[in-house]
Amino acid sequence: MLKFAWRNLINRPVRTILSVLGLSVAIAGMVGLFAISGGIQYLVNKTFEKIPGLLVQQQGAPIPIFSSLPSAWQAEIEAIPGVAVVNGEVMTRVNLIEQKRIISPPRFLVGLDIPTRLRLKNGVYDHHMVAGRYLTVADQGRLHCVLSKAIADTHNRSVGSKLLINGTEFEIVGIYDCKSQLLDVNILADISVVRRLARISADTVSCFYVEQEPGYSNKDLKTRIEKVFVGREWKPSGAMEALSLLAGDGPNPMQALASSFDRWAKGDKAQPKPAPVAQPDPAIPIPSTVEVRSPEDWAEQFQEFSGDLDLFLTLISAVGFLIAVLSILNTMLMSVMERTSEFGILRANGWTRGEVMQLVMSESAVIGLAGGILGTILGLIAAALANRVFPDRLHLHVSVSLALFAFVMSTLLGVFGGLYPAWKAARLSPMDAIRRA
């Protein structure tokens, strides 16, 4: 039956090719769109496989750059059973490299407490060095940095070269390559140097990276750390303080300034009465001042985002599928109308309605198969080209399951597109069909 269907299709090459191309474009578009979501999930999973430890940051901070914690809390975290090493970090955004403004992809200057960083069994970056060396105790207080291969290639730099970062010249002592767009955005330096350049207080850090002792789970250690800092008071500073004020957490600085100016203009020297302090409700549990995130937490957060993205991409793909089905439907209907006499002769020679219907559906299924193969190949090529042309901006990933889904979906679209034409062909009586011809 398939051989007969194939011969019927190649007898009308132009119409068949156009139908296959229309379906393949829809399938290639679907593969390309879902490769975005697949790329995010693949990138997140591969990245957090390299980061087995826990990240301790300020409660409510979306990412560590907006977090601020007292550096003195490091000793308290180290005293918690199950904690092996605690490494303090500070982060600031890199706005200028070689006097060129950096917007996308973003770059971050990360200050590491080098002595404790070297005690980590998995320091993330040190395991992925491709040139030069990692930071050592001798680099403390010096303008030395380790940067990613992506940044070095972008600015044509190598080990021993100088790099102007936010107006300050650093010497490159090492280059790493984690092959992750989430990790290869960082420039690493000594924590005291980054604090001085970013005007971050010496008694604060952005976050702590915690490595656990063997036998302790991330979930258990996360609960222990957060429990220690329940109800602990800490005033946000830096970028996190600005976010809190914008979000309405605390007094509005512009309103306070306007109120002070108004009192000064009226000659009112009296101090404003302090607002009554709200008493905590004992029924409401007091939250921890810190938020501990494990690799599983980060992966889950990204998974929620990719789930919303998948829904949006499904709606877009559905439009393409509808157009493809209508195209196949139109092609097969025209084919049925042109071959009325052929179907009449087949029925007169003993073909049943089911066999006629099977023939037409086989033809549409062949179109679906061909469109699926071509569309999947085009999607793979497009994803590979996008990753090659924009290595720092895109990471598209076409999984085996996505390729198989595209192939099966294309075949089903072909079958569904041929249902009505097949039913119409099967309804023709032999004598009426021959008479019409």
Image (spheres, rainbow, N blue to C red):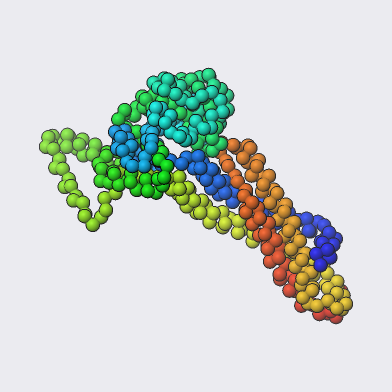
Q: Position of residue 342 (x, y in %)?
A: 86, 71
Residue 121, image x, y percentages: 45, 34
Give the position of the N terminus as an image quadrant. Answer: bottom right
Nearest the viewer among 352 and 88 is 88
Would residue 261 appear left or right of 122 to someone viewing this image?
left
Residue 304: where, in percent of width, then height?
47, 52
| Residue 185 appearing in the image | no
Residue 370 x %, y %: 75, 56
Q: Is residue 412 above or below residue 74?
A: below
Q: Taking 101 as reference, is 234 above or below it?
A: below
From the viewer's perspective, is residue 90 above or below residue 424?
above
> In this picture, is 354 found above or below 47?
below
Question: Nearest the camera: 255 or 57?
Answer: 57
Report whether 211 appears left or right of 38: left
The answer to which quarter of the image holds residue 110 is: top left
Q: Quadrant of residue 167?
A: top left
| Residue found at x 72% / y 53% | 373
Q: Residue at x 42, y 42 (%)?
A: 214
Residue 67 visible in the snapshot = yes
In what quadrant of the picture does the C terminus appear? bottom right
User: Residue at coordinates 50% horizontally, 36% vertically from top-left?
Assistant: 183
Question: Which residue appears at 67% of the width and 47% of the height?
Answer: 380
* Camera-side residue of 393 and 219: 219
